[in-house]
Amino acid sequence: MKLIDSIVRQAEALSAIRQDIHAHPELGYEEHRTADLVASLLQQWGIEVHRGLGKTGVVGIVHGRDGGASGKAIGLRADMDALPMQEANTFAHASRTPGKMHACGHDGHTTMLLAAAQHWGHGANRDFDGTVYLIFQPAEEGGGGARAMIEDGLFRQFPMDAVFGMHNWPGMAPGEMAVADGPVMASSNEFHITIRGKGGHAAMPHVTIDPMPVACQMVMGFQTIVSRNVSPVEAAVISVTMIHGGEANNVVPNACRIDGTVRTFKTEVLDLVQARMEKVARDIASAFECEADFVFERNYPATVNSSAEVALARRVMGDMQARALEQIPSMGAEDFSFMLLEKPGAYCFIGNGDGAHRPQGHAGGPCTLHNPSYDFNDALIPLGGTYWVRLAQRWFAEQAGQA
């Protein structure tokens, strides 16, 4: 692969930064130490820093050789937050904060963007006309940090023509990258259904209205929505993940609750699923003389890449001699989707390997996302940093008609 020498030479120091962030994980909107570290490094490298968007977000401004006079600009985004889970690893850089862990690689995402920033810290390396905005975003893990930064004026204060993101992908080999046109990650939505009946003695069910079998009927009814209402060529997932009800084995409860998630790639499919779920829930409850409170919350929209930016990303991967794959869409969700609702862009993936990179002291579990045995592969830092630099160079060159 063709990697940038200045980034490769800094690989060990960059790895130390990543491991420091890993050892000090912070949850969404609490990334104060991480944001301080990012801002300090950017300033040390001569990059203008703005803070406070989305509470703990950081934006670095890299003007090209024209001082940004062309008016052309792109955004490169990395997320900074960790997850509320206990790390099982015991190696030296394992989490020092109980109940918090970088189990999704945001420590690595932050460091790969810092690698590009350090390269651009040398003025001679800013060989483009325009401006790059380095977006270090808080609260991706359920907190909607991208939306918060946008609401606080991200695109008003820092006008940009396109925006790009990247995520590590376990199971894909190091040196491999992937991108796809159109939807690459699903929308994330949740539902909460409370079924209200009439409690009583479990030995006399005929004088009660038992909400428990009603809940079971609803769960089975939801399965037919995807199999019989959604077109077979469309993708949708309904997962009931919690059923809560009852406190004793001889008591029929007054109520029980069903919770879960819905994932789709298209808004019209989501509209259909939501409408059918509500009708199924209310009608089944009514048939059994219960009442149903139905709440449906739309959290993250689908992450949808735009064609021109995907084609650019593929050209850059080819220039780097990385093995470029077609990304298979995932039903997982990503709040970079909010940025792609506002600007054209591409969200790509970089292979994190199978876990063989983990040092002695890793736990026995797989190196998969959101697993207590996960750890980011530091070998990706030069590749990811090079990708960001080459992406910006090629985007500006093509805008100027030089490519």
Image (cartoon, helix red, strand yellow):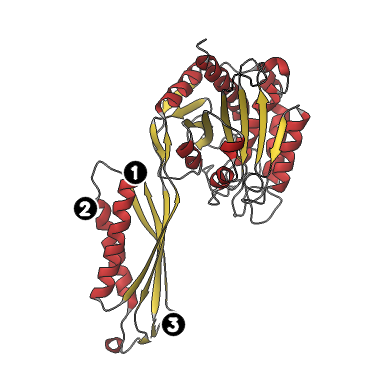
Q: Mark 1 or mark 3: which is in front?
A: 1
SS at mark 2 in the image: helix
Q: Which residue is mark 1?
A: 266
Q: Residue at x 48, y 30 (%)?
A: 345
Q: Residue at x 23, y 45 (%)?
A: 231
Q: Which residue is mark 2?
A: 228
Between 243 and 117, the residue placed more toward the observer is 117
- Label 3 near label 1: C-beta < 8 Å? no
Q: Which residue is mark 3?
A: 248
Between 178 and 297, the residue placed more toward the observer is 297
SS at mark 1 in the image: loop
Amino acid under label 3? Ala
Q: Residue at x 34, y 72 (%)?
A: 292
Total numbered labels? 3
Amino acid under label 1? Lys
Q: Residue at x 35, y 84 (%)?
A: 198
State the image quarter where residue 390 is shown: top right
Q: Residues within 10 Å of mark 3 (few under 14, many from 20)?
A: few
Q: In x, y percent, where is residue 362?
A: 62, 44
